[in-house]
């Protein structure tokens, strides 16, 4: 006899309420009902215990529910929250198995558990661990393990989870459940009801062939399920390494603090999902849906992969402070890109440096102050074009480690003064326009043509140059003659002549 | 004169009694030994008591072309190489020329191009908050002063506290007559002057020589900070 696969079905209990509570964890202690549509015709699809105590029931019209108590708060269901709950369920299950099938219409996940007892000892232990993982991502679930996907899904409609082994046990467990748990075509279901068949136990008494001739093949399949003979298999779906949570806010938010408060649960949910999969994140995107139907995107990047919520929130805070959204925010989505967590290995004799999170935070704050394009590491530009500046992002690692330093190389080159340092240029950005007087082919005097605090003018003692640079003739050409000059007061300047515009400029001062 | 002396003596005694009443110790706790990093200039190291002490604020001032920026970058390079830690150059005047940097600075120096002097000081505080920079150089030569938010002495107090808590070396670079200098917050003040320009035989500018002196040093006697040294800067 061929050994059949064992299938686990993990279903979210009361999906509408669970999805709502993931967004607003305090809702369970309040008198709240979730309705499927806004307005008086909306129906209650989930409610808190205190609302139930007031007499609120599922399927009740919102107007009628409101009439029961003034305290009752009605919230419209957010499809994005429901979708996020399903994705969280997928991530929780992927912590145990590499492939999962999600049934969107049933809010459940299916996967094969055959052979997993070697790792977990028993299927009961596996179920306990699975439910614990689901609780970590804010889900309350019920788990059933059976021989096929359809029977496992049907068994999740019991009041508590169950593990059934063999056809007899499966038939017995299913017998008390109504036929509606199989989600059959409504014509088939009403025909079965007309025949007096209300439970799977009653259905199991018929043979599949008899039912097939009277009601159709779908009913025959239902009979096989009711008899514990379901052998339907899992069809896994591809998984992604992007983790996204979305929410539409109940109110328009236009200040940073409330916006952060509303966005934090989204971050917490995404990070919990990352944790389930053993991932961390180094970059992500926060998208705010604005009142004027546009979006406001924020790219958030940390120096090293992390799951620390405080780091992400501080970075977002800094980013929002630097440039807040221009309109009120009505919704948000947080998307983090999963990657391997950081492996930390410090040297025994090294001074412990700050954590990457601290680096990221400080850099984000500095960037918020001066602009992201003005912070980084100086790099040589890939051109000889004058005044070109290139900066690369800062990284807390030493690419020159192990190389011989320039000081060591130059140690033998000390001159009479015993100390030697490189003379650097204090660049004027933008360059100052200057008037130049030539004598005998060299610069004899300069005068600034613009008003500045510093008075720069005088006779030139020494002049060296021109040093000619030109290039990029194929696109936006440049040509500059550069001179080094020393004025009478021994201040040294670099003067440039732009061959394209014919302008003389003071490029900088040696300092 | 005698009356003034008596008054001062009286005030001293009153202060002493008031201080005793508070129960606080009569003298400040002695400062423990600090880790020092050589500046690369032996005479300057001698004058500063071994080099730059971690957790301290230093000030360097000078006239135009006196090597303020060159010396600052040279010290940043020295500190980065010796400590194996990154350094930061907070450029209040957006004046750094990346082409003249040593390779260690191109790899391990955070360059922040601030727009105003106060912005530069605030960025320096943020950088020191990380505790990861061995030295933070605050270049304020010709930095634009914000009319509504000028540099206040309190700014330097904060920089000093940040330097102490993070064990970073803070170096403030200003013009010689700049009122925004750290003043008494600095552990030592250095001044540089132009000395001579070195000109090659082929009419090429080779560099200049500057005179560097330590004009005030909290940790040294008068003989030490009267020292003047000459530094050669080469293009």
Image (cartoon, rainbow, N blue to C red):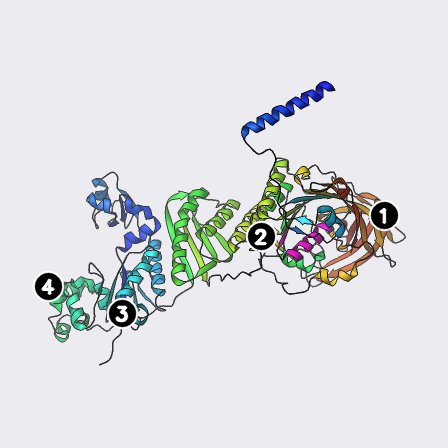
At a point 25% along the width and 78% down the height, the residue shown is: A3
Q: Position of residue A390 (x, y in %)?
A: 64, 57
| Circles 1 and 3 on the same chain | yes
Q: Residue furthest right?
A: A440
At a point 41% along the width and 62% down the height, the residue shown is: A278
Disc 1 secondary structure class: strand
Q: Nearer the viewer, mark 4 or mark 2?
A: 2
Q: Nearer the viewer, mark 4 or mark 1?
A: 1
Q: Which numbered disc, 4 or 1, marks the residue that appears first in the sequence?
A: 4
Q: Are marks 1 and 2 in contact (CB under 8 Å)?
A: no
Q: Chain of mark 1?
A: A
On residue A194, the disc is 4
Q: Position of residue A25 (x, y in %)?
A: 33, 48
Disc 2 secondary structure class: loop
The residue tagged 2 is: B132
Question: Disc count in the image?
Answer: 4
CA distance separating discs 1 and 3: 90 Å
């Amino acid at each position: 006899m061929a050994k059949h696969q064992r299938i686990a079905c993990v279903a979210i209990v009361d999906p509408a309420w669970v999805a709502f509570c993931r967004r607003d964890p305090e809702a369970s202690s309040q008198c709240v009902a979730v309705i499927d549509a806004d307005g008086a015709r909306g129906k209650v699809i989930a409610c808190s215990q205190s609302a139930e105590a007031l007499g609120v029931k599922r399927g009740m019209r919102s107007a009628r529910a409101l009439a029961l108590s003034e305290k009752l708060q009605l919230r419209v269901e957010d499809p994005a929250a429901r979708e996020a709950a399903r994705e969280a369920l997928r991530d929780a299950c992927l912590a145990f198995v590499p492939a999962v099938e999600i049934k969107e219409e049933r809010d459940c996940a299916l996967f094969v558990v055959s052979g997993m007892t070697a790792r977990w000892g028993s299927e009961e232990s596996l179920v306990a661990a699975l439910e614990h993982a689901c609780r970590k991502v804010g889900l309350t679930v019920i788990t059933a393990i059976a021989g096929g996907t359809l029977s496992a899904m049907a068994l999740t409609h019991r009041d508590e989870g169950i593990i059934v082994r063999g056809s007899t046990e499966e038939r017995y467990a299913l017998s008390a459940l109504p036929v509606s748990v199989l989600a059959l075509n409504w014509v088939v279901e009403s025909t079965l009801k007309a025949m007096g068949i209300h439970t799977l136990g009653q259905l199991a008494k018929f043979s599949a062939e008899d039912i097939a001739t009277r009601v159709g093949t779908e009913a025959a399949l239902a009979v096989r399920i009711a008899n514990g003979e379901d052998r339907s298999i899992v069809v896994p779906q591809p998984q992604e390494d992007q983790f996204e949570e979305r929410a539409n806010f109940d109110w328009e938010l236009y200040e940073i603090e409330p916006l952060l408060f509303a966005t934090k649960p989204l971050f917490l949910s995404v990070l919990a999902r990352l944790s389930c999969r053993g991932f961390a994140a180094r970059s992500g995107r926060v998208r705010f849906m604005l009142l004027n139907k546009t979006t406001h995107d924020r790219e958030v990047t940390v120096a090293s992969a992390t799951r620390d919520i405080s780091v992400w929130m501080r970075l977002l805070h800094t980013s929002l402070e630097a440039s807040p959204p221009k309109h009120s925010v009505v919704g948000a989505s947080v998307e983090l890109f999963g990657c391997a967590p950081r492996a930390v290995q410090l040297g025994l004799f090294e001074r412990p440096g700050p954590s990457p999170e601290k680096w990221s935070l400080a850099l984000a704050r500095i960037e918020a102050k001066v602009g992201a394009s003005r912070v980084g590491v100086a790099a040589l530009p890939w051109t000889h074009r004058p005044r070109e500046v290139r900066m690369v992002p800062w990284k807390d690692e030493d690419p020159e480690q192990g190389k011989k330093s320039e000081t060591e190389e130059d140690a033998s080159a000390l001159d009479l003064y015993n100390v030697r340092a490189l003379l650097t240029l204090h660049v004027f950005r933008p360059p100052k326009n200057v008037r130049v007087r030539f004598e005998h082919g060299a610069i004899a005097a300069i005068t600034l043509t613009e008003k500045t605090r510093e008075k720069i003018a005088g006779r030139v003692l020494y002049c060296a140059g021109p040093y000619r640079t030109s290039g990029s003739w194929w696109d936006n050409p440049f040509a500059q003659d550069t001179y080094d000059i020393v004025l009478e007061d021994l201040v040294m300047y670099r003067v440039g002549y732009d061959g394209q515009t014919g302008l003389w400029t003071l490029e900088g001062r040696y300092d | 004169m005698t009356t003034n002396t008596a008054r001062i003596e009286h005030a001293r005694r009153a202060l002493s009694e008031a201080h005793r009443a508070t129960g606080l110790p009569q003298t400040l706790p002695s400062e423990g030994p600090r880790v020092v990093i050589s500046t690369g200039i032996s005479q300057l190291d001698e004058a500063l008591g071994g080099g730059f002490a971690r957790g301290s604020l230093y000030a360097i001032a000078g006239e135009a072309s006196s090597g303020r920026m060159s010396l600052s970058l040279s010290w940043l390079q020295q500190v980065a190489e010796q400590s194996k830690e990154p350094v930061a150059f907070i450029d209040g005047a957006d004046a750094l020329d990346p082409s003249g940097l040593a390779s260690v600075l191109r790899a391990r120096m955070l360059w922040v191009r601030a727009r105003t002097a106060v912005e530069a000081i605030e960025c320096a505080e943020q950088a020191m908050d990380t505790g990861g920079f061995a030295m933070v150089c605050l270049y304020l030569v010709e930095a634009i002063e914000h009319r509504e938010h000028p540099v206040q002495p309190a700014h330097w107090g904060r920089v000093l506290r940040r330097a102490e808590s993070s064990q970073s070396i803070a170096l403030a670079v200003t013009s010689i007559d700049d009122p925004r200098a750290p003043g008494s917050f600095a552990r030592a003040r250095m001044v540089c002057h132009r000395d001579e320009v070195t000109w090659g035989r082929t009419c090429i500018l080779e560099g200049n020589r500057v005179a560097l002196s330590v004009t005030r040093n909290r940790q040294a006697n008068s003989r030490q900070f009267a020292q003047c040294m000459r530094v050669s800067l080469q293009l």
